[in-house]
Image: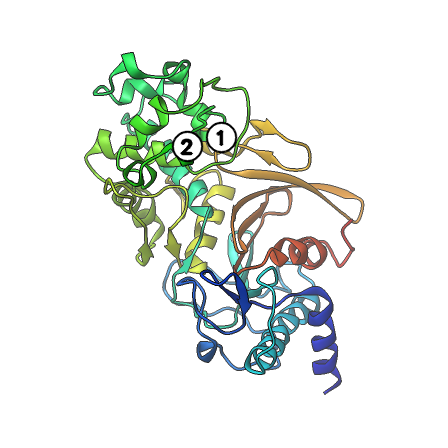
Amino acid sequence: MKRFLLAVLFCLTTLGCVVAQDATRGKSVAGKNWHPLFPKLENFAASKIRRYSVPAETGDGLPVSPAGREGFDVKALVRMTNGIDADNAAFLKRAKAGEAITNKQGCIDSFLLARNGKLVFESYFADSTIDKPHFTMSVTKSIASLGIGKAIELGVIGSDKDLLVDYFPSLDRSKLVAGADKIRLCDLLSMRSGIRVDDKKLSRKEKVGRNLEVTSLTLSAPIKPGKEYKYQGTDPNLLSHLIGLKTGKKLEVFLKEKLFAPLGIRNSGFNTDAAGQTRAAAGMRLRSRDLLKIGLMVQAGGKWKGKQVVEKKWIDKSTAIHVDNGRSKYGYFWWSQYHTVGGRKLLVKSARGALGQFIFMVPALDVVAVFTSYGTRKPSVLFDRVVLPACVGGARSK
């Protein structure tokens, strides 16, 4: 009982609770499943006192190992997962009582941790299970970057320095805005395309992406590529259209054949735009274990089970820092950030998605962690304050 009370206290001081917001009324409404990505309350698993057990071997290609053997503070990780679980229970009680809860809070629904290429810790919460694909939001961008690297390796794309317009020969170049013909693929990959389109001036057909390349390159304000960083969906979606045009296959098909198949990823989902092309900005759905596989493959320089799935030089280039905005640094749809743990400065590379989706990679520790969530950024807090210290003997990070 004492442990349970401590777990409840921990969660109430460090975590939030998920809620859906009524998009039409603009009110916080606990328990309404207005957003198709959020679970229904009745699907939440009952809370329980969690104890550590080694993840199961399921035949999906992930090797497993006891967390203690790999040098983790297991007790700290168990306390964290009990806190997450108790927080879900507190949310359910409040939601069922009709209490309005802001949608800036949230609920973590899976946490996985690996070291030395082995899964050592695995917990699911809310409605998540080992086999359920989860929306990844902008983690989609990072995985799309791997697809671009594979396309370069296979000769589908010449180079990341190629000009974008050269891949759309049907474009009427006389109608392009100033600077559009100077955009390189690397500008798109680092969110520095310079494309700035005022959505208020677009028709519905243009907004849904039916003629994305035309809209982006003819209706934008004058473009200065490679200069200013702006995080936007247009840049990855243009690259998806490029892949579709060059291969005759949607990006999702290309990824399934060239990336997912070698990794043993068999359960995935994607969204498409009005042109029938894959949305590369967001919309991919994968199991948490498969997100971990991708992180492990990237951490290993593009290798999986001894096979080079993506060229190492692309892994190095795409996860390198191309844009430095201070604390957060950006590569080719991958993020980098420095954390200090016990006086040690560690580079953490990551894929990040809205509503609390993360793949964290710590090369110096050979650690990969995955969080999936419903509407919270708490995973980044827990990763910094609990997971990283648990990797290095319990020292508190700063």
- Which quadrant holds the N terminus? bottom right
Q: Which residue lies at the image location 74% right of the left edge and 57% below the top edge?
A: 393
Per the model, the C-alpha gap separating discs 1 and 2 is 6 Å
Residue 106 visible at all: yes
Answer yes or no: do the residues labelled 1 and 2 have beta carbons within 8 Å?
Answer: yes
Q: Is residue 194 above or below residue 119?
A: above
Decide if residue 154 is on the left or right side of residue 356: left
Q: Which residue lies at the image location 51% right of the left edge and 38% below the top edge?
A: 334
Amino acid of disc 1: Met
Q: Earlier in the sequence, mark 1 or mark 2?
A: 1
Q: Is residue 261 above or below residue 179?
A: below
Q: Which residue lies at the image location 70% right of the left edge and 71% below the top edge?
A: 12
Residue closer to the observer: 357 or 147: 357
Residue closer to the observer: 371 or 203: 203
Residue 310 visible at all: no
Q: Which residue is mark 2?
A: 235
Q: What is the x, y in percent for residue 166?
A: 29, 17
Density class for disc 2 (Cα within 10 Å; few <14, some 14-19, many ≥20) is many
Q: What is the x, y in percent for residue 227?
A: 54, 19
Q: What is the x, y in percent for residue 127?
A: 46, 72
Judged from the image, the secondary structure of the residue bearing numbered disc 2 is: helix
Q: Which residue is mark 1?
A: 191
Corner quadrant of residue 99: bottom right
Density class for disc 1 (Cα within 10 Å; few <14, some 14-19, many ≥20) is many
Amino acid of disc 2: Asp
Decide if residue 329 is on the left or right side of residue 119: right
Residue closer to the observer: 196 or 281: 196
Q: What is the x, y in percent for residue 74?
A: 66, 67
Residue closer to the observer: 240 or 114: 240
